Each structure stands twice: as structure tokens, then as C-alpha cells.
Image: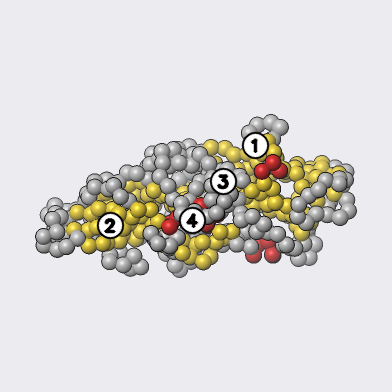
Amino acid sequence: MKTSNYLWAALATTTLSLSACSSDENENGMQPKEKTAKLELTLVGAPADSRATGTLPTTDESQINRLTVAVFTGATGNPVNALREFTGKDIKDAETGSGKTISILCEPGDEQMIYVVANASPALFAGVTNLAGFKAKLMLLSETTKVAGSGDATDAQKPSNLPMLGIVNKQNLTAGAEATATAELTRLVARVSISSIKTAFDKAGQFKDATFNVTGIYLKNANSSVNAEKIGSIPISGSDKANKYLYEAVASHTANTELTTPYYFYAFPNASATPTKLIIKGTFDADGTGSTSAPVTRYYPITINKKQANTTITGGEGTDKGSIAANTRYVLTAVIKGEGVDDDSKEIDPATLKLTVTVADWALTINQNVTFE
């Protein structure tokens, strides 16, 4: 997770051009043995509008470093027709525009299914023989910590290696003829960000002199893997000791001032009974001086996209337990009016935190505003 000053979002569109051919071209991965058709795949992206609730660095969120293209036949069990992973020079500049182009050889046939995955782990799909096996493979959230998809995993997420998926159904490939198809490549992650945290303690209430200082922001119960059906699994939580890429220390916040530096995390879909939460961690002092009671660590858990009191959700309806959808941005703001909980696994009184959530597809935005009272 990082903070920065620019917002740019994109949907990647893939255009497929297929032409029948015979070739001795050396292809990596499983390839057809007889008649072949050449599949040319062009990928382009389009930027989205910025938003007014904070600025984030996302100029690289549509970057493609590695592509896996898999073609499956319409026969029983959907066996692999062709499968190849593309990196580096195999992903060429398109002849026109700013897109990229790759080519793969496959056998002609009717009702072929084409799956395109971007930025998965190297060789993740090697050895896959059918569609079911392809769908069973798990893409890892830790891949988002690699710089442009290379090297080892790190302790910080990067916008330049987000996993994406595109599907084309029932594509006919005819020997000796050309065909074109278009697939939309969308991100398998959501982006959860918080752009404003401020306090508003009641000057006539119990905590009239209270102070709160933010010391950390992190995700809890974030799915660490996802499959090609966009189902997330294996939840993990960020901390300063484990899964550091889902945790961000806040070192320079002055108590009771608005924190406007935007913080963001990437997370896979989660629609389970254990929803993903963004946790605000900090030091709460009930009287502001530490003389009556000592300052204590308190947590303010925000269940992403949950319908509840003191929560405003725009751009989406929210769910009863909270949920995260792929290729969606969740933009949070929070107002703290009371004392948080002493354990981040506990639920908080919705009256303690006023929340606003903005939810939308990546080209748009979903806002969630919450107030803790």
C-alpha cells in the first residue's frame, strides 16, 4: 500500500484477430498438432475520470507485464486447444494506437472459449489440460507487491501488477479464414481507500476533551487468493509483523486534525460471512491530557460496503454483512465522535463512527462515509 498524488483508472479492452494458417513458429506451452489458426490479441486501455474525495497514484493500474492466453474447445470437458504465457518481447506494440499485440497458434473449431489472464504468477497455468483445471488455479494477492511483475514479493503493494481477466465465449475459428473478437479485460482486485479521517467529539458530552491520534491503517479478513470465477478465498489480515503489504503505519498525524493523506489497498472479492474490514488504529485519550486516564490503543473497524446506521453509501446499495466486488473502488471517509474498541475483531457501535462509502466500477467510484459517535 502506498500514498501519492494522482488518480487514473482504466479498463483494458482486448481485441482478438484470428486467421487460419500453417506455421512452424515455435510457441511456448501446449499447442495444436494439425491445422492451425493464428490468434492475434491486441490490448488497449482507456483512462477514467478523477474524483474529488482524494487523490491516489494509479497511472499504472492497467499495466500488463505477463499474459496467459488459453483457448478451450467446446468438446466435453472443454479440453485445452492452445495455451501460452507471454512476457517481454512476446507482447509487442500494436501497429496502430498505444495497445499491445500477441499471437498464438490454435486449432480451428467452433464455439471455442478464450480466457485471457494478466499479471498472474509465472507459469501458474502450466500443465492445465481443461477449463476446470484452469478455473481451479489461484491467483495470489502477494503478486500485487512485485514491481512490474518481476522479482520477489515485497512489503508494499504496487499499482503496476494487478491481476486481470477477460473471457470470450463461443468463438468460431475456421481454417483458411480470418475472424475478430473483442474481450474486456477487468481487474480481479478491488481498491479500498480512505481519504479523510477526522474527529468531532461533542463539546458537551462525555469525551468533550478527548483526543485521537491515528497510528495505523490496515485491512482485516482480506482474501489472499482468487480464481478465474472471481471467487476469493484464504482471508488474511495486515499488521506491522505479518502481511505488511496490507498495513500502513501513520507516523505524522497530529491528534484531532483531519488526516487527508489518502491510503489505499488492493483486495480480492469477498462476499463471505467474514467480510473484509478497513481498520483505523490509534491512540485515544479520554481527557486529552492523560491525567484522568492513560492514553490507550483503540480500533475503529469499518466493514466494507455494509449497510448500517450512520453509514452513507453512494454509487451502490451495500449489503447486510458487507462485501467486496472485483474491479470496484471503495472510497471511505470517517468521522470519529467516540471511543473505539480495544480489539479489532470486535464490532463497534455504529453511532461511534459516521461513514461514507462511494462504490463503483473502476471507471467510477463508490463512496462510504461513517461516523463513530
Residue of label 4: 267
- Pinpoint residue 186: horizontal percent, then vertical percent: 58, 48
Residue of label 3: 148
Residue of label 2: 282
Q: Earlier in the sequence, mark 4 or mark 2?
A: 4
Q: Earlier in the sequence, mark 1 or mark 2?
A: 1
Dot 4 alpha-carbon crowd within 10 angstroms: few under 14, some 14 to 19, many 20 or more:
many
Q: Earlier in the sequence, mark 3 or mark 4?
A: 3
- Single out the mark in the foreground, 3 or 2: 3
Left or right: 96 as drawn, with respect to 341: right
- Single out the mark in the foreground, 1 or 3: 3
- Single out the mark in the foreground, 3 or 4: 3
At 73% across and 62% down in the image, what residue appears?
A: 127
Residue of label 1: 99
- What SS does tag 4 mark? strand
Q: Nearer the viewer, residue 283 or 274?
A: 283
**Alpha carbon distance from label 1 to label 3:** 17 Å
- Single out the mark in the foreground, 1 or 2: 2
Name which residue type carries label 4: Ala
Left or right: 179 as drawn, with respect to 88: right
**Alpha carbon distance from label 1 to label 2:** 45 Å
